Image (cartoon, rainbow, N blue to C red):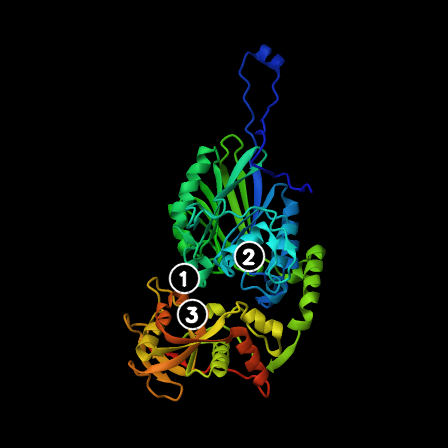
Amino acid sequence: MLRKRNILLSVGLATLLTLPFSSADAAVKHKPVKKAHPHPIEVQILGINDLHGQLDVTRTVGGRQVGRADILAAYLKQREAQVKDTLLVTSGDAVGASAPVSALFQDEPTLKILNTLHFDVGTLGNHEFDHGVNEMMRQIYGGTNPTTGEYFKGVNFPYVCANVIDKKTKKPLLPPYVIKKVHGVNIGFIGVDTTETPSITIPTNVKDVEFTDETEAINTYAKVLKKKGVRTIIVLAHDPGNSDYDGKNATGKVIDMAKNIDPEVDVVFGGHNHAYINTKVAGKRVVQAYSYGTAFADVHIWIDPRTKDVVKDSAEIVTTYQDSITPDPEIKAMIDEDEERVAPLINQVLGTTTTTLTGKQNESGESNLGDFITDAQRDITQAQIAITNPGGIRADINSGDITWGELYTVQPFGNTMITMELTGDQIRKALNQQWRDDGSSKMLQISGMKYTWDSTKTDDKIVSLTLEDGTPIEPDQTYTVAMNNFLASGGDEFTEFAKGTNPVNGPVDLDALVDYVKKQTGPITMEIQNRIQKVN
């Protein structure tokens, strides 16, 4: 089916630019005719990042409801209609950590929506690897769904990634770049995924690939594109960063990358940390549009048809407010159909809560949802201590009825609980791994123990460390500790946990949470338990 946009793949003859010329005028005036300056070609690039299959999930920004794929689609189509030449791109984590309406079907509903919206280019994020390389390649190129048994044709647009290398072939797992043609002008797209991926997914998921430096990969293929005559280059980078709303104080890995990648690169779409970026760095436009379909980046570039290079750019991060647009009927119908298929399961009411259970942490690094989840894990495993990673808590639970679908959205990975033995010294060392050399932190959520910490200390921030009843955790004593298999394998750079002994497999983490909610005899009133306290 032909697309409405006047955009072609990089095949065929270049468009010839012709200008009117009057030979009669030349004969009379005997003067050379000045050619009119050709108008720059305007191209609009609409970008999303970190959608995470949140097709039917509504969130709140400034007291207004945002998100849902049918709302996002309506905004994208509205903007697309305003500029003849428009490209749609996704810079990673379109799938993974998804809502049940997508995840229960191996995220095919999300990919079908991207197909329906005619996305043009995508790159990988760490969550594309959630089910391993083989499943990721099936989702991209097609194959039989291992859950439903139905055949999925794959995506109808290219995925590119320059820095994920097949260990056997020593070549990129996916094409490193693609060239799109607009009015005879070639636009190159290079994709890269964060090198953090091996440390934030289960090791077996990426055992057959390696992740090389993003900047080096971009520069390698920018040279290739330039040799092909491409002077407009866009990078889709699943790498994090931040900026103020006025573009100032831009920081983060993607910002550092922008400073060091080839000057011919014009735009960088970031991702991974679900943040806002709209800034210029070393002459390059850098953007990131939060996550979950709550916003998108609208980038405009103007290309000189003679030099084939960008002469001007602008960008806007657009929030998808639900009260400002009508949901796209085509995408809404797709969501409704998938919701109907999973409704009997996800709509089961398992309990109630009078308070919002949120993963938002206080100044000390603790959340009431983190407390509740680890209590559930300790309850089902009967371990002395339970620990979970904050990245494993993917959504909040609003006050009111708690459904199975809500709990699935909170813990969608299907990780297995592991109970192991750790010494007090190993627990202390693992807690100190929460604070990273770059100044960031990943605060673990805990049950069965308490500790205080001092941010002014360097090598060992832990001041006191006890069991729940106040008994000191002794360095040479052994304790039973429950955690998901991701953490148990040293995920999120908590390498100390991988040294645990006598591991015992338990239930899936979601089942532990479901079971615990069902056990509550009345409405949940969980507040932060002050298990973690910052003392300075």
Pointer 2: what residue? Answer: 94
Name the mark nearer the viewer: 2 or 3. Answer: 3
Between 22 and 72, the one lying in front of the other is 72
Residue 388 placement, left or right of 158: left
Under mark 1, the amino acid is Ser
User: In the rendering, at what x and y percent does residue 185 appear?
Assistant: 54, 34
Does residue 49 appear anywhere in the picture? no
Q: The residue tagged with tag 2: helix, strand or loop?
A: loop
Pointer 3: what residue? Answer: 487
Pointer 1: what residue? Answer: 199
Q: The residue tagged with tag 3: helix, strand or loop?
A: helix
Between 511 and 76, the one lying in front of the other is 511
User: In the rendering, at what x and y percent does residue 93 appear?
Assistant: 52, 57
For the C terminus, the image quarter is bottom left
Q: Earlier in the sequence, mark 2 or mark 3?
A: 2
Disc marking residue 117:
none
